[in-house]
Image: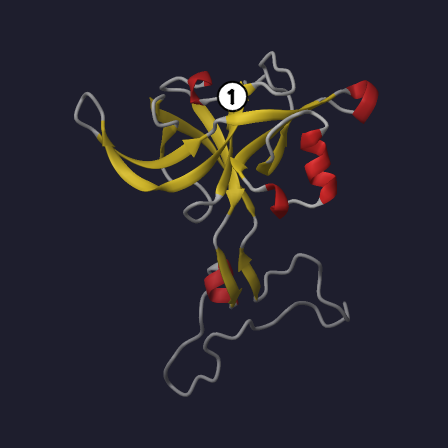
């Protein structure tokens, strides 16, 4: 079982440990989150906890989403995410803050990576280029794309295309500091996404 929370990436800085070591950290504004729905096997077919994060005005939501909050007498939230195997006794309307985490815990952080647009095979897959001199007419082109007899391109072949803007999970990141007053988590290393992007933070389950 695990603990989970939603947060917003604020940026990166460095943190000095007690022994003088300097650690690059990502500052995340984690919570407070509200439990907007408890999903059960009898009703939904699986067990999960839905968390809401971020303030939003009512006119920004469509009627189905707004009705989900009003039927439970909850304030509307901008972002909704589901988590399975949560080891917390929660009810609809319960609040989750950074105090559920402790310094030194390991977490998995998921988010949407930065979009790079349409990229070539060298940038996207780290392929080698051809020789640039002596009359070579092959520089940054993809090259051969497979067997002649196949008459098709095999699925999953590494070619130019859209790079980034996909779900990425960084695993086993250490929580360096928990700031209860400002709802901040300092997580060692880098996490996916641009500044102000939403992150899913979940403790590592062993």
State left or right for residue 182 relative to residue 165: left
* Few, some or many residues within 10 Å of mark 1 (<14, 14–19, 20+): many
- Secondary structure of the residue carrying tag 1 is strand
Whole-percent x and y of residue 102? Answer: 40, 17
Which residue does the numbered mark 1 point to in the structure image? 96
Residue at 47% across, 74% down: 140
Whole-percent x and y of residue 68? Answer: 71, 33
Q: Is residue 19 visible?
A: yes
Whole-percent x and y of residue 183? Answer: 39, 27
**Residue closest to the far left:** 20
Which of 178/139 is in front?
Answer: 178
State left or right for residue 9 relative to residue 142: left
Quadrant of the rendering where the C terminus is positioned: top right
In the displayed structure, would residue 195 be above or below residue 25? below
State left or right for residue 187 relative to residue 54: left
Quadrant of the rendering where the N terminus is positioned: top right
Whole-percent x and y of residue 24? Answer: 29, 37
Residue at 73% across, 28% down: 71
How many marks the image carries: the answer is 1
**Residue closest to the far bottom:** 135
Which of 89/26 is in front?
Answer: 89
Which of 149/107 is in front?
Answer: 107
Residue at 37% across, 29% down: 184
Residue at 65% across, 20% down: 92
**Residue closest to the far right:** 42
In the displayed structure, would residue 188 be above or below residue 133? above
In the displayed structure, would residue 122 be above or below residue 6? below
In the displayed structure, would residue 34 be above or below residue 147? above
Q: In which image quadrant can residue 41 be found?
A: top right
Q: Is residue 205 visible?
A: no
């Amino acid at each position: 079982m695990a603990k989970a929370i939603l947060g917003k990436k604020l940026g990166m800085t460095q943190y000095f440990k007690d022994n003088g070591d300097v650690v690059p950290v990502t500052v995340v504004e984690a919570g407070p989150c509200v439990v907007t729905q408890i999903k059960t096997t009898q009703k939904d077919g699986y067990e999960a906890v839905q968390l809401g994060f971020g303030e939003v005005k009512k006119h920004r939501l469509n009627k189905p989403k707004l009705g989900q909050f009003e039927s439970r007498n909850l304030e509307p939230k901008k972002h909704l995410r589901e988590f399975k195997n949560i080891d917390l006794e929660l009810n609809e309307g319960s609040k989750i803050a950074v105090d559920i985490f402790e310094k030194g815990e390991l977490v998995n952080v998921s988010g949407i990576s930065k979009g790079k647009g349409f990229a070539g095979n060298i940038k996207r897959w780290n392929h080698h280029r051809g020789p640039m001199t002596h009359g070579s007419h092959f520089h940054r082109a993809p090259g051969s794309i497979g067997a002649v007899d196949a008459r098709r391109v095999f699925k999953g072949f590494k070619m130019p295309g859209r790079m980034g803007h996909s779900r990425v999970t960084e695993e086993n990141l250490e929580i360096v500091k928990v700031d209860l007053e400002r709802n901040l988590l300092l997580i060692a290393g880098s996490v996916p996404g641009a500044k102000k992007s939403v992150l899913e933070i979940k403790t590592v389950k062993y």
